Image (cartoon, coloured by chain):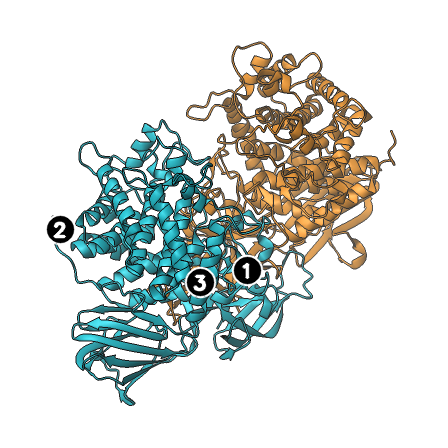
Chain colours: A orange, B cyan
Amino acid sequence: MNMAGQMPRSERIALNQVRIRDDFWSYYIELVKDVVVPYQWEALNDRVEGAEPSGAVRNFQIAAGLEQGEFYGLVFQDSDLAKWLEAAAYLLEADANPELAAIADGLIDTIAMAQREDGYLNTYFILKEPDKRWTNLTECHELYCAGHLIEAGVAYYQATGKRKLLDVVAKFADYIDSVFGTEPGKLAGYDGHQEIELALVKLYEATGQERYLRLGRYFLDQRGQQPFFFEEELKRRGGKTHWAGSGEHVDLAYHQAHQPVREQETAIGHAVRLLYMLTGMADVAALTGDDTLLAACRKLWDNIVGKQMYITGGVGSMPQGEAFSFDYDLPNDTVYAETCASIGLIFFAQRMLRITPESRYADVMERALYNTVVGGMARDGKHFFYVNPLEVDPKACGGANHKVDHVKPVRQEWFGCACCPPNIARLLASLGEYIYTVQEDTVYAHLYIGGEAELQVASGKVKLTQTTDYPWDGTVCFEVEPEAEGRFTLALRLPDWCPEANLKVNGEVVALEGGLFQDGYIRLQRQWCAGDVVELNLAMPVTRMYSHPLVRANAGKVALQRGPLVYCLEQADNGANLHELVLPREAELHAEREGGLLGSLVTVQAEAIRLSGPDWDGGLYSSSAHLLEQAATVKFIPYYAWANRGEGEMTVWVRERY
Amino acid sequence: MNMAGQMPRSERIALNQVRIRDDFWSYYIELVKDVVVPYQWEALNDRVEGAEPSGAVRNFQIAAGLEQGEFYGLVFQDSDLAKWLEAAAYLLEADANPELAAIADGLIDTIAMAQREDGYLNTYFILKEPDKRWTNLTECHELYCAGHLIEAGVAYYQATGKRKLLDVVAKFADYIDSVFGTEPGKLAGYDGHQEIELALVKLYEATGQERYLRLGRYFLDQRGQQPFFFEEELKRRGGKTHWAGSGEHVDLAYHQAHQPVREQETAIGHAVRLLYMLTGMADVAALTGDDTLLAACRKLWDNIVGKQMYITGGVGSMPQGEAFSFDYDLPNDTVYAETCASIGLIFFAQRMLRITPESRYADVMERALYNTVVGGMARDGKHFFYVNPLEVDPKACGGANHKVDHVKPVRQEWFGCACCPPNIARLLASLGEYIYTVQEDTVYAHLYIGGEAELQVASGKVKLTQTTDYPWDGTVCFEVEPEAEGRFTLALRLPDWCPEANLKVNGEVVALEGGLFQDGYIRLQRQWCAGDVVELNLAMPVTRMYSHPLVRANAGKVALQRGPLVYCLEQADNGANLHELVLPREAELHAEREGGLLGSLVTVQAEAIRLSGPDWDGGLYSSSAHLLEQAATVKFIPYYAWANRGEGEMTVWVRERY
């Protein structure tokens, strides 16, 4: 294999190495285990009364010859099941669960029976258009579904050691490898929805077979080359499209297929597609030592995070195409900010962290996780947001102004469209992967989430016990227990939101001086002994946040953040017409723990001003401002907790006076 | 005819009674005569190189048997020609123009030859779907096109005394009368696009035939009655629709057919449809003494003007459906505010004024005219806006953020879609109709536009000569010349924007005391002699305007207005990133006449503040505001004049500091 050689890169940390015991997160992870995954299994089996049928399990049963019937659902229906299986695998990796394992094993048997002789495995094409394989990669998600199956196969193997699904997906991948490539007789194509690239890297890592890595790299290298495959393919189909309403013209940029991936400098097109692609690009760059690919990752990271990301970690500001728009264009009301896109951003950040542990990646991972992702699911585990607005007027929703038809003022039942809910499930079920990385003799703590981890550093095994009341409190304790006394570095992230930190090791203050910092981490290099205790105190004041001055939507406005949590005003606490509220720059901001509110959280109160017009008599326009200026105590809650008390207005950005 | 009897109502003022000689308006009216109407004739005959063919004239020639070929264009293509002919008629009413008259006469001959034996006249259905007459009123604009032909026939008759087209359209109307109605055997329908209602009133007034008024009233009475005609009609067509993408469901509210017209209280649906309907409703209410119909007009007027109108007189805040959205929802960037909708608002205002001369109607008429309508056309007479935004960032247009795909940052050539340009033409060509009304012994001056008018009051004929440099200066002189000395009232509108006025009659100050005012007019009742001179001085300061506090989009913002003109900031004068500018409430506002700028206009300068971030180093979000605060002299220009100096940002509403 003609590759330049690997870059140093942290290994994946298995979920049985990291046990989360955390007031904030354990709730959600238990919810995934007890509610989301079981409930979703019922839905995938069409056993939830009143819910839209899924057909996903049955499609595989029919393809396996176990049932009679026709394919049901969308062309990418298989991926729902694959994501569910991946989430189940993560649960099984963390904890034994014989009942779930039995269900999963049974499902895998069915999947294996559905596979064709040559390795092909996609129930839509097997059942509905058997002679149309690989004829519409632009629209039909064929390799996307393959990628999700591969991820499931790898996850299940990692979780259980069982090879059955891994072998199935490896055989499928071998078949795909025989079909795709630039060699004569092969199809020089790639998928309309990126996903297989990152999946093939996982398959390579699970099997050690370089051909999968090579195939993943091929899909990236070929993307955006001329002549454009999607245009050629459309010609071959005589202009026939899969989706009604899609026309003669392929929007190449929507698929990030308008340029070779190494030449792309600005985030454009469908957000999830781009972020899955970047995740795969970072993986391939690291494993093949491809600096130009890594440079493209960094450039696009900088563009996304520096110019196109909401303060909540949401990305994709445009509902049309669920897409990025352009630099500094971050409207709060017409926003898309799909939950899946923030999950993709977390994947991408994780991969970048595994290559170069710089806190800026973890900062964004944390921002997306604590705001958009956890906000994407209700506390009941059964209601979800696909779109995560930063400003909502429910009067406008539901058709009153069609520009916000995509915005729902309350979370919806998850089975209307099934892409985000299982994505949240698989992310939360695998959260243990995201907390630490180890690179040579350094353990990096990226996220502050309580629990135990058993990690392998150069000098040997070490157990870390993290204790914290994060995100409500900035005190984080680590108890360090190396198997044998040894010298290594514990690197603790200093979050971007933290203005002041202090540190004690075994009760003694360690001065946080320049030399101790590198790339945003406090690096404690020492001979660690069992029982060593590190206490990190991160000052967590409520902070006024401002947008870059080119962000038109937020000019003159302020948002509050405390720790990793972005705050918002809701009608439930502050009455209607939130746009009438103005927060003086000098107003004191009081954080207070409210145990009884939405599962216990810290609220922020302030003395604001309400500019209203009870006596306004000027019609719609008037030459005098006529406004009544009243003191108004306002209460902010964490953004993730919004819309749990019925329908009402919400806003993250508030007018400021100074 | 079982009608309660007419309400007092001003007669239409013929255009040969009013000769406009005005620095501001004569330019536009000459432009219509010399450029717009001749140019459009070429376009309608498919003789403009590079322009999309129209087919409108040829369709009539084919239907008349003068040409061979097929129908070309949209289902409502006939209306383009009708509106052109109506504009031509107004020009001919004002001034002799043998060349234009010859063209129009020739066209009328063709139209007459195209008419079927039974009176039917619509080239789409004659040529393309002869067996489908009256089967799709919802979508096919059949009565809408008829209405425009009727308006043209009436206008041409009024202008020239020639009956040929009037007879053609009367025959068509008689045929329509035989088809539609609630009587057994008739079709109890009405059109998807209102227009015929107001046209039938004009036909009644031109012919004196009450059946036309009765038919117009029928269309209004029947609209929105249950069972809903559009739903029944769709069933009869087996669900077949005319436009691709229109589905099984009829959006009744889009057509204002969801409720009987008298029960509608909130402006909803397609803006032009509603305003044409209201124009017809006001006419029918007056001519039949129908108080409930007039009450509905007033209620909807109040809703539109009091809750759903932009400060520019634009209406319809939503591009989807070119429609009203909901109360106080007036986004500046995603706005629609179609030029035709403001023209419709002017029609409606005129009809209300003819019934009840209250200045509030004329105030809105003036606002729409001086801002959206005149702004809808470039100074070359060849470029037009359909959409009239109040805030534009050209970076977002052209697909970068699809939510503003409908917004063009510069005026487009008029023949891309042909509805607004001929509407502007016919309005400007008939502007003389809108300046005065006469009711019994009172002459009302609604608009301040220089020129001469010969009016008939109870006591006899009177000639008024109006001289003014309006809208730049608030001094307006009237020279009064009654044919015979007589007692009558001259009522001069005191505009809503004017904080202070004074008045002289023959050089002597008249104290403007309470008794002199009524419904917004200064009423000068006296024995007028030839040579009497009235001088009205309207103070015309630059005024800060504020929106009702429930208008979310304008919270904390101010707009400038001077006289009837709303102002805006343009990038050409103020650089990019207009959102960075803040206007202090105490800043002095200097109005200055600039003779060389865009045909001479008054600009407004002020010392503002620019909050920019040349040294911003906080990435996309930062905990410190970091903004450089610099004094910035800003220059506002009248809104109507924007986008005449290339592509750039524009905003009407500016952040205010106080």
Residue at numbered disc 3: B32
How packed is label 1: few (under 14 Cα within 10 Å), some, or many (20 or more)?
many
How packed is label 2: few (under 14 Cα within 10 Å), some, or many (20 or more)?
few
How packed is label 3: few (under 14 Cα within 10 Å), some, or many (20 or more)?
many
Residue at numbered disc 1: A558
Residue B334 is situated, as x and y percent measured from the top left of the image, at 49, 53
Left or right relative to B430: residue A325: right
Left or right relative to A91: residue B360: left
* Tag nearer the camera, 2 or 3: 3
SS for dot 3? helix
Q: Which residue is drawn at 29% across and 37% down?
A: B117
Marked residue nearer the N-terminal end (2 or 3) = 2
Q: Residue at x 81, y 24 (%)?
A: A184
Vertical placement of residue B216 versus B205, above or below: above
Q: Nearer the viewer, residue B410 or B169?
A: B169
Please state the chain letter of the residue tagged with numbered disc 1 in the rendered image: A
Residue A111 is situated, as x and y percent measured from the top left of the image, at 63, 16
Q: Which of A366 and A509 is in front in this view?
A: A366
Residue A605 is situated, as x and y percent measured from the top left of the image, at 48, 58
Residue at numbered disc 2: B3
Residue type (three-letter) at the residue carrying disc 1 = Val
Q: Residue at x 31, y 38 (%)?
A: B116
Q: Residue at x 54, y 61 (%)?
A: A557
SS for dot 1? strand
Residue type (three-letter) at the residue carrying disc 2 = Met
Q: Which of A343 and A495 is in front in this view?
A: A343
Q: Can residue A77 be seen in this view?
A: yes
* Tag nearer the camera, 1 or 2: 2
Residue B422 is situated, as x and y percent measured from the top left of the image, at 42, 55
